[in-house]
Image: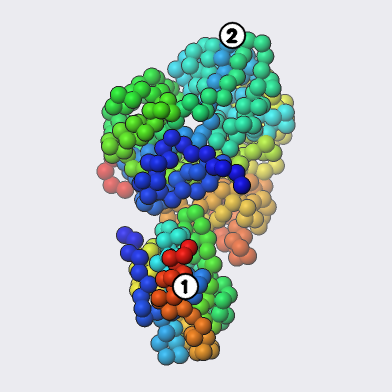
Amino acid sequence: MAAAETYPDDLRYHPEHDWARIDGDEATLGITWFAQDSLGELVHFEPPDEGATLTKDSAYGEVESVKAVSDLIAPLSGEVMAVNAKVVDAPETVNEDPYGDGWLVRVRLLDAQEVDALLDAEAYRKLVAEL
Amino acid sequence: MQTLRRTPLHDRHVALGARMVPFAGWEMPVQYEGVIQEHRAVREDAGAFDVSHMGEVEVEGPKARELLQGLLSNDLDRIGAGGAQYTLLTNERGGIVDDLIAYELDPFRFLLIVNAANREADFDWLRHREMRGSDVRDVSDEYALVAVQGPRSLERLGLGAAHAFTFEEGAIDGVECMVNRTGYTGEEGVELLAMADDAVELWDAVLARGAVPCGLGARDTLRLEVCYPLHGNDIGPDTDAISAGLGWVCALDKEFTGADPLRRVKAGGPERRLAAFVMEEKAIPRQGMPIVEGGEVTSGTHSPMLDRGIGMGYVPAGLAAAGQEITIDVRGRERRARVVEKPIYKREEHASGGS
């Protein structure tokens, strides 16, 4: 039940295949369709603790498929307000709906200006097409 | 850069959309639709694996049996023509050069099906010890091997039941092959050895009969659930059969290379044992992770049937009994696991519904 390949226009992207949905001074983070497809069916999500601080471009958790482990790279710096418990219980949710039910964490941004450095959907699509 | 070898079924895998990866010098399908659904197909119905990368060595001649009896750990006199046997090629220290299945084609001719990664090493090992009256030949390139495994595999192939570890000449939809009642999944099934030129026709016939194509990813999760060791991970030249729990394939009442060191390990009791474990906490153990109480993980994965992390590893002998708690160092995080009886997955306990 994998989702079809899409990169929604309303999201911003990090070249390590993470997305961010910006909502004022908060953001929801997840991994892109490309990332979940490369990994295969996810079977484990190692989340950060609530209250932990994410640093842009640094690892904040891990996702695993049967065969592979991948670091989650923070597209933005922020404090973790919520972890998606549904993905902790059923990691395959990310494969089924990477931009919806398969979100990973919600953060309070520490530096809203960092958003400007992220890719828009068109630039990210171009990046993926070249891989 | 080394050029990867391709099996006769390579184009079929690509056409099926398989993800191809390098494995032991071969370009092999790791998955088609997904590891978990392929795994389930084998546990619930039937799956087909291209395992043509495995090596085949033929040993023939009036002294063939004598040569093999001196080099292999198990006792070939326990089988006859038409019989097969899981056995080990051992070194002088009692370490494991390879694990393999020996097929007695006739009293003077044996076929050894060996791990792809060890094909050259096994062949060299045997040829250097060849004696007058025993001819050792690497015939790997002549054959393709397709494993069809799962509770409905025989029904789908139109084959009757037969004892495990036997073989016969047969055909699937007109494609002649050696039908071996062997496998690496813990399920009923066969491994079909056909001429390389017939591989595509055999594969197409097997898939047309409803077997689901399965890659090396599912092959690994399936074998680990039933605790079949993987050479290079769980066993190797520096591990002995007794510590690995493979004493049952060592005929210590006959003479073979490394028998003496193995007798000593058996008499003294091994210091470490290959234990199977299930994670008590959410985490997936992986090869090379330290076991905090001593030893390390030799194989680890996510079990699709248990929906948990599972693994095997060498632990101090006192911790190898079922029920013992051990701790896996998962990239710096300590996660609890419990040693269990092998196999980790047993059909009776986990089968849901019907028969």
Q: Chain of mark 2?
A: B
B148 vs B246, left or right, is left
Question: Does any portion of residue B277 appear in the rendered image?
Answer: no
Residue at position x 49%, y 75% from top? Answer: A14
Q: Position of residue B252 (x, y in %)?
A: 65, 23
| Quarter location, residue A30 | bottom left
Q: Do labels 1 and 2 touch, CB within 8 Å?
A: no
Which element type, helix, strand or loop, lies under badge 1? strand
Q: Which residue is mark 1?
A: A18
Q: Position of residue B179 (x, y in %)?
A: 39, 25
Dot 1 alpha-carbon crowd within 10 angstroms: few under 14, some 14 to 19, many 20 or more:
many
Instruction: Name the residue type under label 2.
Output: Pro
Specify the label residue B279 is tagged with.
none
In this rendered view, identify the residue nearer to me: B279 or B114. B114
Q: Position of residue A129 (x, y in %)?
A: 43, 65
Specify the label residue B62 is tagged with.
2
